[in-house]
Each structure stands twice: as C-alpha cells, then as structure tokens.
Image (tube, rainbow, N blue to C red):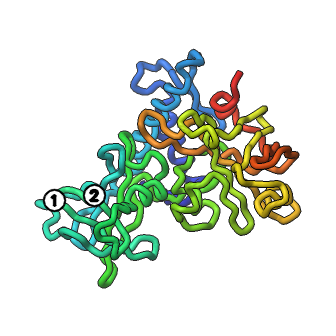
C-alpha cells in the first residue's frame, strides 16, 4: 500500500477503488449484489427484520474490518529482530494479551520483566514464553494493576484484539530504550465523532486529558473547559440508590440525574447550569448496558449538550438539549418505541 493512513481523503479513495467496489459490485457472488455503496454509506440491498438488525450490523462490521485490515496490511508487517518486532493483540479470558513472534524465528527476545516506554512513560512488561501477559508501572511488584488492557483499548478501542482485528504493539529499540507504539490496522489514534464507539479508556485522550482510573470510572467528570457525562442507561444491577433516571426523551432531548449528594447551589450544580456562560462544553457519552456478551460495553458519543432546565435536589434531574440530533442508529438503540 502506498497511501499514508493519515491522509484521510486519499485513503478513502484507495479503499473505495478496491475492495469496497468489489463488495458492492457482486464480486465473488456471481454478480448478485448484496450491498451498495453511495456517498460513503455502505448498506445492504435487502431488508432486515428489526430484531436481527443489530446482530447483522455487528457481524458485517466485524467481517468488513477484518477484510480491510488484511488489505491495508499487505506488505506492512514488521520483520522480526530483537531491535524491531511486533506483538499481535489477542484475547484470553476476555482481556487483551500480546502474543510474541516465534522465539525460533526471532532469537534473543526479552525474557521476564523488561523495561519499556509507552507514550513517554516508563513501564515494565512481563515477557513469558509465548506472550506478554502483564504491563505495569515500575515498583508495582505484588500488585495486580495490569495496564495492558487499558493501553490496548486506548489505542485500538473497545474491540482491541477481538477476532477479525489486526492490532499490534510495535517494539523498537531506540538507544538503550525499548519503545512501544501502536501498529497494524489500529495505528491511527481515534478522533471524536458523534455516533462513534469508544472504550472508557479512550475518552480522556480524545479531549486532551490523561487517564486516571479513580477519576474516569465516575459518571460525572468536570475538567477544565469540559464536563463529561458517562451514562449507562440500564442499571438493574446497581443498588436502588444508584439507579438514576437517565433517558433520551427524543433525538434532541436527554434527561440526566445527578448523584444523590448534588444540590443546585453546590459547586457541581452551579457548574451544570452555568456551563454555557462559563465557556464549558458538556459532552454526552452513552451505552445501553455495562456489559454485553460478557464483555465491557463501549460508549457512543452523542455530542455536546446544553443545559435546558432542572428540578429537584439531591439528586437533581436535569434536562439537556443535544446540539446535534441523535443519529438514527442510536435512536433505534436508545429510545424506547
């Protein structure tokens, strides 16, 4: 491939020429066209029952991403050496893990705990026989804070390492350091876009902040210039006092309920109602359930919202107006008919 992944316009043209034209043109299906492509929209040519739509979307997306990954990766795999090698991201027990290249083909790969650098920070990786199963901060011996899943999902999103993906950690010797960068199909950092899915670990970097588990596991996150709302709509597994009444009332209206300790006159209450006057953007990220098929669910970015009205105390019920209408695929998922 001779098109830079960062050149979005040329990359789209490259993929439209092939393989997308082949998919939409009936190649391999004796000319029968099951898909069409027009104005950057890829869709089926046949009707799908409502109850099967989400499953078909997920399956098509997984297969398309896998085929695109293989296509983009032609001729780009890193040749193995102890100074420059690639580890494929896979899964074990629902968590990302890195598989090493064959030690027979790349003799001299590190063993045991090895110092590495990722995004300018020092870590240590546990090189076992065929894989790297733990990456941690130095000095965390005896602790279970494995940051490998968080880094993989920050780089590649909620599907990091799942079947059909082609994600890699690239290890390169730079002086005395072993520096790690994302590679494979996921070597472009994500950008913020309405209707796109993001792992929780990805969201801080999208807005210019660093990940801190103690902060970003919350649902209301005030930051300089921003308020971030991370909402799970279905809360049946939560204690009754945490089953906040969050819901889309229409494609342009969202009802959000604060924590039980928040008052209208308090610091967070004033930040909520005065965010526009204060020049603070409020961002809404929503998922239907915390987990799906045993895996942690990603959040969909629903865009910026603006305070419209509120009522009550501890908790406060806030009405927000979406600045951009909710995309149709999210209307189907999030708004009860």
> What is the total number of numbered labels drawn onto the structure image?
2
Which residue does the image show at 75% across and 51% down from the upper left? 304
Q: In the figure, 10 relative to 29: above or below?
A: below
The answer to whether residue 22 is visible is: yes
Q: Nearer the viewer, residue 23 or 215?
A: 215
- Residue occupying the far bottom of the picture: 175
The answer to which of 147 and 163 lies nearer the viewer is 147
Q: Which residue occupies the extreme left position in the image?
A: 104
Q: Look at mark 1 in the image and give the residue it sits on.
A: 129
Residue at point 69%, 50% (across, down):
259
Q: What residue sits right under mark 2 in the picture?
A: 133
Q: Is residue 40 visible?
A: no
User: As displayed, is residue 234 above or below residue 215?
Assistant: above
Q: Disc 2 on helix, strand or loop? A: strand
Q: Residues within 10 Å of mark 1 (few under 14, many from 20)?
A: some
User: Judging from the image, what secondary structure is the residue with disc 1 in?
Assistant: loop
Q: Where residue 279 sits in the image (x, y, percent)?
A: 83, 64
Question: Relative to 32, is 88 on the left or the right?
Answer: left
Determine the residue positioned at 60% across, 60% down.
206
Q: Which mark is residue 26?
A: none
Q: Position of residue 303 (x, y in %)?
A: 72, 48
Residues at marks 2 and 1 touching, judged by CB atoms closer than 8 Å: no
């Amino acid at each position: 491939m001779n098109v830079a992944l960062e050149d979005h316009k040329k990359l789209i043209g490259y993929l439209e020429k092939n393989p997308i034209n082949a998919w939409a043109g009936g190649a391999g299906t004796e000319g029968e066209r099951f898909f069409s492509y027009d104005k950057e929209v890829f869709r089926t040519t046949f009707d799908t029952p409502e109850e099967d739509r989400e499953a078909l979307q997920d399956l098509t997306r997984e297969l398309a991403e896998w085929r695109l990954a293989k296509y983009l990766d032609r001729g780009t795999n890193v040749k193995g050496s102890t100074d420059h090698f690639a580890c494929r991201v896979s899964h074990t027990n629902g968590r990302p893990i890195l598989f090493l290249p064959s030690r027979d083909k790349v003799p001299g790969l590190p063993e045991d705990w090895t110092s590495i650098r990722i995004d300018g920070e020092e870590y240590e990786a546990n090189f076992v026989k065929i894989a790297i199963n733990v990456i941690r901060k130095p000095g965390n011996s005896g602790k279970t804070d494995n940051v490998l899943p968080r880094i993989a999902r920050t780089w590649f999103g909620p599907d990091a390492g799942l079947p059909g993906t082609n994600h890699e950690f690239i290890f390169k010797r730079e002086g005395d350091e072993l520096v790690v960068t994302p590679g494979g199909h996921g070597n472009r950092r994500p950008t913020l876009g309405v209707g796109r899915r993001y792992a929780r670990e990805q969201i801080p970097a999208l807005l210019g902040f660093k990940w801190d588990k103690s902060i970003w596991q919350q649902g209301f996150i005030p930051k300089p210039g921003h308020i971030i709302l991370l909402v799970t709509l279905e809360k049946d597994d939560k204690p009754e006092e945490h089953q906040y009444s969050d819901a889309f009332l229409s494609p342009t209206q969202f009802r959000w309920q604060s924590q039980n300790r928040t008052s209208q006159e308090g610091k967070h209450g004033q930040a909520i109602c005065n965010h526009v006057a204060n020049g603070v953007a409020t961002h809404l990220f929503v998922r239907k359930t915390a987990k799906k098929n045993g895996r942690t669910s990603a959040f969909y970015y629903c865009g910026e919202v603006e305070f419209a009205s509120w009522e009550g105390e501890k908790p406060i019920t806030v009405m927000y107006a979406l600045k951009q209408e909710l995309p149709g695929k999210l209307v189907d998922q999030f708004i009860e008919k």
